[in-house]
Image (spheres, rainbow, N blue to C red):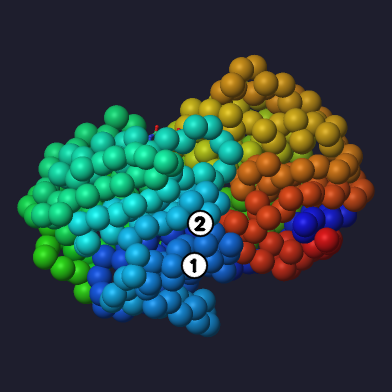
Amino acid sequence: MDKLLINGGRRLEGSLRVSGAKNAALPILAATLLTGETVTVANAPHLNDVTTMVKLLGRLGADVAVGESPQVTVTAADLRSLKAPYELVKTMRASFLVMGPLLARFGEAEVSLPGGCAIGARPVDLHLKGFAALGADIQVADGYVQAKAPRGLKGARIKLDLATVGGTENLMMAATLAEGETIIDGAAREPEIVDLGNCLNAMGARVSGHGTARLRIVGVPALHGAKHAVMADRVEAGTYLIAAAATRGRVRLRDIDPGALSAVLERLQAAGAEIEAGADWIALNMPGRPGAVDIETRPYPGFPTDMQAQFMAMNAVAEGSCRITETIFENRFMHAQEINRLGADIRLLGPSQALVNGVESLKAARVMATDLRASFSLVVAGLVAEGETLIDRIYHIDRGYEMIEEKLSALGADVQRVS
Ligand code: UD1
């Protein structure tokens, strides 16, 4: 099993291009099932989660080609199966996103209940309630969800009790081919949802309000082929900014819209970082030891849960103490005790709050990655720590960070993959 060996204690300095967003690429690849024509997805990141989605589309019978640039071309003309099997869905929760498109286009779908990161229960009840509101008959048996709408879906008013990202995406995709108008209130507003909405509209859908809490989708009889370039990965960008700040470094990121990162940039500035930004770039300089800053995760445009772990690692070496509050997921502090193995002083005050007392320096140790974003918090800690930190189970990182050794090396880090 691959491990990452980091010889820490160096400042990150240099410039990087931000990859395409995993969390936008996955729903957009699922959306290719909404048409029999060819959809070209450009700027798709080369990641294990994307490979899993490509495999799933192939298993359903779509014709998928992964080309240079990187670009994925999908033609889902004749599918041979409408079933997403357990072995593919269990490794990645986002596989559940094929349900909306299959149900909308074929009137039927069978999808395994999802697995994915071990961060809380993460049910799909809101997806299912929404499909039922659109007229589908939903049965759960033997770990699979079976959905049927033999006469097609019907537009409806849906109120989401909680701004679920995946739920909003699944229902938005399903509604594109439903008869009549669908209104989704309480919709999630993440930039990845805007990207998906734009792709759906390029395919002939009539989606409006994406990026607000009220989506309006007017169903059309069929969608057509299109070409869409995936937005830049704001989580990857924020992660490298936090890593640079923790090492008192200086980085410049290209091909990224700073607007999507406002909450993170504001917290980095509060920690003492100097930030400059243009239309598609962000530069950060951390002139000295970061100051501790409180964070509380919130749905977009609040501070993203996917950057909580990395920020905790920076706070671990900051001057002062702070509180980190996680409001999106239960059980998302598994990284705290691993960071403590490097000499940090992080105390859990309960399932959703941690107290971080900043320490002067960290010391290298062997640690284990527990989930995707948590893994990168260990990388941040390892980059700061004096000596050789070995991070085990980095397959978690490979799910969501493209070319991590190359990117970190380009910034002057001493990292290598070992088995
Ligand atoms: C997406 C992101 C993930 C991010 C998360 C929150 C992708 C592929 N993944 O995950 O990186 O951490 O948004 O920003 O885009 N919930 C329910 N019932 C449901 C659905 C969700 O109770 O039917 C709860 C979940 O347990 C969780 C919260 O809602 O506590 C947020 O989940 P959700 O927004 O759905 O996250 P994902 O779409 O799975």
Image position, residue 193 (x, y; %): 34, 52
In the rendered view, does 348 fall on the left or right side of 365? left
Residue located at (74% from left, 64% from top) = 405
**Residue 55 tag number:** 1
Q: Is residue 1 left or right of residue 71?
A: right
Which image quarter: residue 103? bottom left
- For the point 34% across and 77% down, the residue is 75
- Residue furthest top in the image: 349
In primary-sequence order, the first of circles 2 and 1 is 1
What amino acid does circle 2 point to?
Leu
Say which residue appears at 26% left-offset and 48% top-offset: 147
Q: Is residue 195 left or right of residue 344?
A: left
Q: Residue furthest left?
A: 180
Query: Where, quadrant-wise, is the C terminus in this rendering?
Result: bottom right
Q: Kindly tell me whether residue 58 is visible in this rendering.
A: yes
Q: Secondary structure at mark 1?
A: helix
Residue assigned mark 2? 88
Q: Quadrant of ligand 1?
A: top left
CA separation in Å, label 2 and label 1: 8 Å
Given residues 54 and 368, the one toward you in this image is: 54
**Residue 257 lies in quadrant:** bottom left
Image spot of residue 228 (x, y percent): 35, 72
Q: Residues within 10 Å of mark 2 (few under 14, many from 20)?
A: some
Is 238 or 73 nearer to us in this picture?
73
Tell me: residue 41, above or below residue 246.
below
Q: Is residue 198 visible?
A: no
Q: At x 77% / y 57%, what residue is drawn?
A: 1
Q: Amino acid at mark 1?
A: Lys
Find residue 250 and report its horizontal and vertical position in percent.
70, 56
Q: Is the C-beta separation of discs 2 and 1 under 8 Å?
A: yes
